[in-house]
Amino acid sequence: MPTRDEIAQQALALPLDDRAFLADILEQSLREDENSLEELTATWTAEIDRRLEAHRQDSSRVTDGESALSEISQHLQADRSGKPA
């Protein structure tokens, strides 16, 4: 697979019309990525807001990471040994 520098050199060696075509395609691709990032940001912002509201209403249980990992580990060990956690 060619490196990006090799691709750039090959692209720069193309005739003007072909370079313009590539530039247009790359610009469209960048816009699509930007839209995807904005959509992802909006989705995560909504999820964070939902979780904060659930926490404020006390309908969710909050556990620190260390305790959560410990609890998961205990459940996994219990599952493997066939004993209830």
Image (spheres, rainbow, N blue to C red):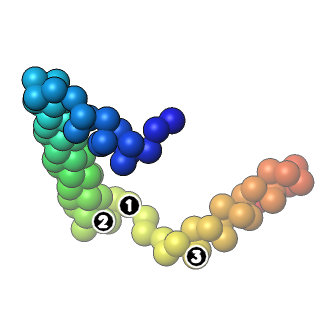
**Residue kind at label 1, given as amino acid type:** Ser
Q: Position of residue 15 (x, y in %)?
A: 16, 26
In the structure shown, which secondary structural element does the residue marked by tag 1 occupy?
loop
Instruction: Name the residue rendered at 66%, 61% in the picture.
Output: 72
Residue 20 visible? The answer is: yes
Is there a contact, CB below 8 Å, between mark 2 and mark 3?
Answer: no
Instruction: Name the residue rendered at 58%, 74% in the picture.
Output: 67
Is there a contact, CB below 8 Å, between mark 2 and mark 1?
Answer: yes
Q: Is residue 29 above or below residue 67?
A: above
Mark 2 or 1, nearer chain start: 2
Query: Mark 3, residues whose alpha carbon is within 10 Å: few (<14), some, or many (≥20)?
Result: few
**Residue kind at label 3, given as amino acid type:** Glu
Q: Which mark is residue 55?
A: 2
Q: Is residue 67 above or below residue 84?
A: below
Q: Position of residue 31 (x, y in %)?
A: 13, 39
**Residue kind at label 2, given as amino acid type:** His
Res 35 → quadrant: top left
Q: Nearer the viewer, mark 1 or mark 3?
A: 3
Q: Which mark is residue 66?
A: 3
Which residue carries the number 1 mark?
60
Q: Position of residue 20 (x, y in %)?
A: 10, 29
Mark 2 or 3, nearer chain start: 2
* In the foreground, 71 or 7: 7
Query: Mark 1, residues whose alpha carbon is within 10 Å: few (<14), some, or many (≥20)?
Result: few
Q: CA distance from mark 2 to mark 1?
A: 5 Å
